[in-house]
Image (tube, helix red, strand yellow):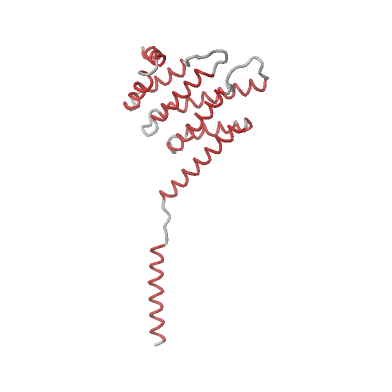
Amino acid sequence: MPGAVADAALKRKRKGGLQAAKKRPRSNSNESSSSDGEDEQSKILLLENGILESRKNYNNITTLIEISRKQDDSVETAVVAAVSLCRVFIRLLASGNLSKKKDASEKDKTIMRWLRERLGEYKGSLLPLLKRDEAALTALTLSMRILKAEAEHLHSGAEYTFPTAFFAEIVSALVQPEVDDNVREEFMEKFVNEHDDIRFYTFKSVR
């Protein structure tokens, strides 16, 4: 009898162990990837907030640009970084941090020039996203928001100066065969058909 009891107990133990093994959660690669993506997005937001809190954190801009350029690694993460940078640069443009000022100190002039260089790098990172179907419409919106902010705030003393060079780059990127027709249609419907200056410079660019 003790042997029978032991055998029965062993069977119950094995059965329970098997059931426990079946119930034990397995690592899911999709869940891991999702967690990694969330971590990256949290990191991006922290970098953005640091920039807006103090210009001591302006080097965060360089980090965000690097992330936005890694489009082959993760387009989604690159887009999140691009959106954060758009908010950053619009805020900096509106506050006059990228405008030339006669009474600015040498330090402020140096920072202004540095910010303008980073803005140029950021705009350059947006254009390749126009060729990525999953990111193209967002990249178009961001590009046009930056264009508008530059027109309104980049040149001190002028109420509105159209950024012809950047706009020509946007149009040139949009006419590339890799860009989906839906993106060009969005550009025409949302911007060309709605704004006289956009329509004028579009026709001028494609001549």
| Number of numbered discs visible in the structure rendering | 0
Q: Which quadrant of the view contains residue 5?
A: bottom left
Q: Quadrant of residue 203?
A: top left
The N terminus lies in which quarter of the figure?
bottom left
Furthest residue to the bottom? 1
Q: Classify residue 186 as left or right of residue 126.
A: left
Name the quarter where the C terminus is drawn: top left
Which residue is drawn at the image coordinates 53% and 24% (left, top)? Answer: 119
Residue found 58% across the figure and 21% down from its top: 96
The image position of residue 186, as x and y in percent, is 35, 25
Residue pictured at 40% horizontal, 77% vertical: 10
Task: Residue 113: give x, y in percent of width and height.
Answer: 59, 21
Q: Is residue 92 above or below residue 37?
A: above
Residue drawn at (47%, 25%) of the image? 124
Q: Quadrant of residue 137?
A: top left
Image location (x, y in percent) of residue 121:
51, 26
**Would you place residue 159 above or below residue 75 in this image?**
above
Q: Position of residue 66 (x, y in %)?
A: 51, 33
